[in-house]
Amino acid sequence: MGFWVARQVDSSAPELASGTWFPAARPIGAFALTAHTGQAFGLEDLQDHPTLVFFGYTHCPDVCPTTLVQLAQVKKAAGLGDLRVLFVSVDPGRDTPPVLASYVHAFDPGFIGATGDAAEIARLTQKFGVAVARVDLPGGDYAMDHSAAVFLLDRRGEIVAVFTPPYAVASFAADLRRVAPRLRG
């Protein structure tokens, strides 16, 4: 019943095979990070291009590299010339801009990596609803537990959809093509 009511409220909302379209775009507001180039990166850098945003870290043993491989495939299969992928590090202690540059470009030369101070990253993950926790490991090392969702931003830099694993490249790409006209901003 709830699904039926929700569909009646916004019957124009696209049905996504691999994600959820939000009834209203969610602004994320201003933020201040540093891109893998060493340049400042903020909300204004998200405007004018649809962007897939994924939070992770370069020392991640499995989820992050797997997701970034899939996002490279999705980006290519979607065929949206101005679609960007932004990887936001949740491990600013190890993920410096040069480390991020090497990491993201291993998956796709067009990917953008971003980092910042821990407080700014915490504010941004909260805006996206991403859970992050440091897990101390034996021997003094640590891992970062984090949500594995991918967020779609429209050309205004607002969250319009979320995709959750497992990711099927073909349906994810088809969803992006389906919603492309709605990403104009």
Image (cartoon, rainbow, N blue to C red):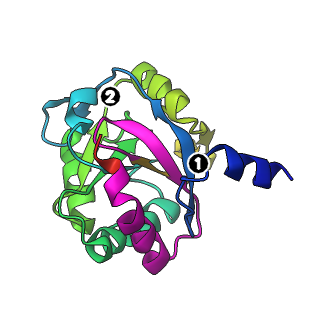
- Residue type highlighted by circle 2: Gly
Observer-nearest of 59 and 79? 79
Q: Taking 12 as reference, is 24 above or below it?
A: above
Observer-nearest of 63 and 23? 23
Residue depicted at x 56% and y 44%: 22
Check residue 171 for magenta coloring: yes
Residue depicted at x 27% and y 67%: 107
Number of residues whose C-alpha sits closer than 10 Å to that of mark 2, classed few (under 14), some (14–19) or many (20 or more): many
- State which region is magenta: 153-182
| Residue 176 falls in image quadrant | bottom left
Report the Cα–Cα distance between label 1 and label 2.
18 Å
Check residue 59 for magenta coloring: no
65 relative position to 110: left or right: right
Nearer to us: label 1 or label 2: 1
Q: Taking 80 as reference, is 155 above or below it?
A: above
Q: Where is residue 154 shown, x and y percent of the image?
A: 34, 44
Report how many numbered discs are placed on residues in the image. Answer: 2
**Residue identified by numbered label 2:** 116
Number of residues whose C-alpha sits closer than 10 Å to that of mark 1, classed few (under 14), some (14–19) or many (20 or more): some
Q: Where is residue 113 shown, x and y percent of the image?
A: 27, 46
| Residue 119 falls in image quadrant | top left
Residue depicted at x 52% and y 59%: 14
Q: Where is residue 27 shown, x and y percent of the image?
A: 43, 28
Q: Taking 17 as reference, is 53 above or below it?
A: above
Query: Of the numbered discs in the image, which one, if any, rests on residue 147?
Result: 1
Residue depicted at x 39% and y 22%: 29
- Residue type highlighted by circle 1: Ser
Q: Where is residue 108 shown, x and y percent of the image?
A: 22, 66
**Labels 1 and 2 touching (C-beta < 8 A):** no
SS at badge 2: loop
140 relative position to 153: left or right: right
